Image: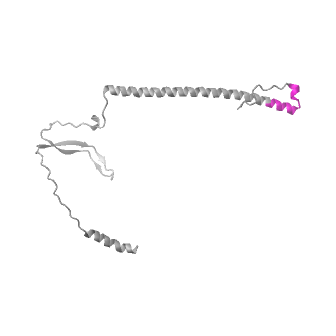
Amino acid sequence: MRTLWYILPAVLFAGCATKQPVAIQAPPVAPVAAVVPTKAVETRYDVRGYREAANPSIRHEAHAVYRRTIVPANATEDMVTVPRTAYAPASHSPLSGDAELAAELATQKAITAELRAMQSSMSETERRMQAQYAQLVRQSTEAAKLREQLEADRSRLRSGVSPAASEPVAANAAAPTEAKW
């Protein structure tokens, strides 16, 4: 590290000592344009009263500000200022009437197609939900019947009455491999 401190100043001074020839070229002289007669136009801007943001104790009263602009002498006297929003920006190029109408029609067709697709999807989903709900209702009533049958069998077993004496055992009509739940 110490040797680096010894070498670095020597390299810097040696690098600064070399001189390369520099070509000096005078800048081109700009051609003087023909002198166009001009005149000064003053524009008045009314500024309402306000308080300074940095120091609210300072208040500026309403006053006029004048702006001096140099314009060609042949400019008309009645130069009227208009807001910037009066004209479309240069980046905006409106479509012609036919093209604009065609673009709007294409957009509406696309939106209509999307709405129809959503509607068919929703009706299919509704149909599946109603089928699931009907299946749930059937399973719920079957579960309620089985629960009642189970409670009846429990009460018979507790009272000591055999099931054969009270009522015959009915065979289950459903296939044993069918899932109930």
102 lies above or below 36: above
Q: Is residue 111 left or right of residue 11?
A: right
- Residue shown at 52%/26% (left/top)? 119
Instruction: Answer whether residue 162 is magenta in the image.
Output: yes
User: Could you say which is closer to the camera, residue 51 or residue 45?
Assistant: 45
Magenta portion: prevailing SS class: helix
- Residue shown at 27%/48% (left/top)? 60
Q: Is residue 75 left or right of residue 92?
A: left
Q: How is the image coloured?
A: one colour
Residue 137, horizontal then vertical, whole percent = 68, 27
Which region is colored magenta?
150-166
Find residue 126 and report its image quarter: top right
Residue 49, horizontal then vertical, whole percent = 28, 45
Quadrant that contains the N terminus: bottom left
Q: Is residue 68 left or right of residue 48?
A: left
147 lies above or below 65: above
- Residue shown at 33%/27% (left/top)? 99
Instruction: Answer whether residue 176 is magenta in the image.
Output: no
- Residue shown at 35%/26% (left/top)? 101
Find residue 14 and report its image quarter: bottom left
User: Could you say which is closer to the camera, residue 46 or residue 60?
Assistant: 46
Residue 128, horizontal then vertical, whole percent = 60, 27
Quadrant that contains the C terminus: top right
User: Could you say which is closer to the camera, residue 49 or residue 31?
Assistant: 31
52 lies above or below 123: below
Residue 165, horizontal then vertical, whole percent = 88, 26
